[in-house]
Image (cartoon, coloured by chain):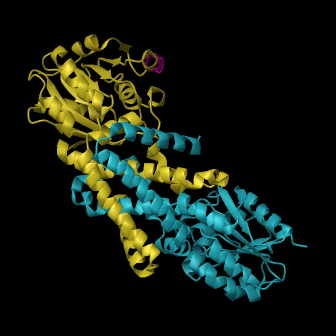
Chain colours: A yellow, B cyan
Amino acid sequence: MMKSLAASKITIVGLGLMGGSLAGALKGRCSAVTGVDARPKAIEIALAQGLIDDATDLRSAVSSADIIVLATPVRVIMELIPKIAPWLAPGSLLMDLGSTKRQILEVMAATPDHIEVLGGHPMCGKELSGVEAADPALFQACTFILSPLPRTSEEALALGRELVLAVGAVPLLIEGERQDYLVGTLSHLPYLLACSLVSTAHETTSADPLAWQIVAGGYRDTSRVAGSDVEMWLDILMTNREHIVAAAEVCQAQLAHIVEMIASGDRARLSEKLSHIRQARGEMFP
Amino acid sequence: MMKSLAASKITIVGLGLMGGSLAGALKGRCSAVTGVDARPKAIEIALAQGLIDDATDLRSAVSSADIIVLATPVRVIMELIPKIAPWLAPGSLLMDLGSTKRQILEVMAATPDHIEVLGGHPMCGKELSGVEAADPALFQACTFILSPLPRTSEEALALGRELVLAVGAVPLLIEGERQDYLVGTLSHLPYLLACSLVSTAHETTSADPLAWQIVAGGYRDTSRVAGSDVEMWLDILMTNREHIVAAAEVCQAQLAHIVEMIASGDRARLSEKLSHIRQARGEMFP
């Protein structure tokens, strides 16, 4: 029988934007929140901002916890799972916040059977990174994907849902491969487009000093995610390569098609295409 | 001797998002704001919301005004200029709010010498359109490009600046060709990327009902401008084709380069590229 969230000791490994925010959102809603981070400065800030109750070393923190949440970049999550699994108490719940799920779930599947495992991915963030940017309200109303493994018990899944609801988010169950396909287009592709846009401006118009004075809202919004943490993104891109490359190929074809209509001055066909797109976006954000 | 802004009668032709907002921002800062729009409903709303002092037909409105601002889509601006120019009072100032300038300035250059002409382009907006979305605060702190012609007098330019400052915006002088080059990358290209992204999702992930629940902030921001008025955009794209196509080609090459590094798993080179891009965006929005 697993403990309730309120009775659980929770350890968050990785006190960056996401880990620090989750810690702050859980503090007071569980028995204790313990933080782990290799950087003493991150621990210091998390304590000073009241995001965690205490901090200790990795082994002590994970072995004494009822719920362990890995909030590091994806590659570190995949390194940590086999490393810490033997230290975890029987029946404890191991979760993560990684943006890609298939490879993480494969690593989780290889852990000893006496621990519970559950993939997680909150669909929120901001272009700032680090615990300095942490905000316990970050998860409010955001969709929080949960990806159970076949071995994940009903009880463990229920506890995961309780945690998601406790931080103000909305749980959504998706299996790993399907979530990687969806976020490849809906989260990872936007990052590539933002980067391509910034890179284009950097190569061309940025040479004109006036360019800095006319970057308007459209550019600011479209480029926003290009400002987010590079290491986090490298891990995401490297662990979702097939879906991202496929999404980018569709997008390149779409862009080429639109550009071709502009170049040839085909206003009628362009009008039809852009109207269709505008309608599609309206349906996405009613 | 031109009148001061406070003593000027101003006519705004086209009461959409931009025209309606400008009218509201100028009302009370000049002698009177008269609105012109072919749609009786737009007039009705503009009057009800207190954006304009009165409304009348095009010829009466422009012939009695000291300042005339054309706030329609670009193609209509280019049709209106030769049509109304003969009706304008000697010494009156004809401006526009079009997103592209070179072609509009060419049409302005062909007007009779007894009127003053000055191109304008406020670098603001939102994805909503129509007078219902008008907001007199829209121009606060936004860059407002002014593109004078060789014949534009110092006095007319000073009056244009006064108008820009009166609505809370920051005037920036750029000649037409240079502004079209800059906004081609900094405003028009983001629109194409937003459209390509929405189109990609529409062709692929939108078939999965869960997609609608996980569209995150990155997607929302990157796709935002794809929701804006299509007729406005068609005119922009058709009157800045060369610069937009050139910008899109650079961007397509940048995207292809990034995708190639992802496909080949070249983490080291990708890291260098993305870090460079992140730094560039940081310099754009310090």
Depth order, front residue of A213/B263 = B263
Q: Is residue B190 visible?
A: yes
Depth order, front residue of B260/A232 = B260
* Horizontal relation, residue B4 to residue B78: left or right: right
User: Could you say which quadrant of the image residue B264 lies in?
Assistant: top left
Who's the residue at 41% across and 31% down the image? Answer: A17
Q: Position of residue A138 (x, y in %)?
A: 40, 36
Who's the residue at 68% across and 79% down the image? Answer: B106
Quadrant that contains the C terminus of chain A: bottom left
Quadrant that contains the N terminus of chain A: top left
**Magenta residues, dominant SS class:** helix
Q: Can residue A122 be seen in this view?
A: no
Q: Position of residue A51 (x, y in %)?
A: 41, 22
User: Could you say which quadrant of the image residue A169 lies in?
Assistant: top left
- In the rendered image of this protein, does residue B252 appear above or below residue A21? below
Who's the residue at 39% across and 26% down the image? Answer: A20
Q: Where is residue B21 in the image (x, y as percent from the top left)?
A: 63, 64
* Horizontal relation, residue A83 to residue A34: left or right: left
Write the start and end of the magenta stretch as one range: A44-49
- In the rendered image of this protein, does residue B81 appear above or below residue B223? below
* Horizontal relation, residue A81 to residue B281: left or right: left
Who's the residue at 33% across and 33% down the image? Answer: A167
Q: Position of residue B14 (x, y in %)?
A: 61, 76
Number of labels in the image equals 0
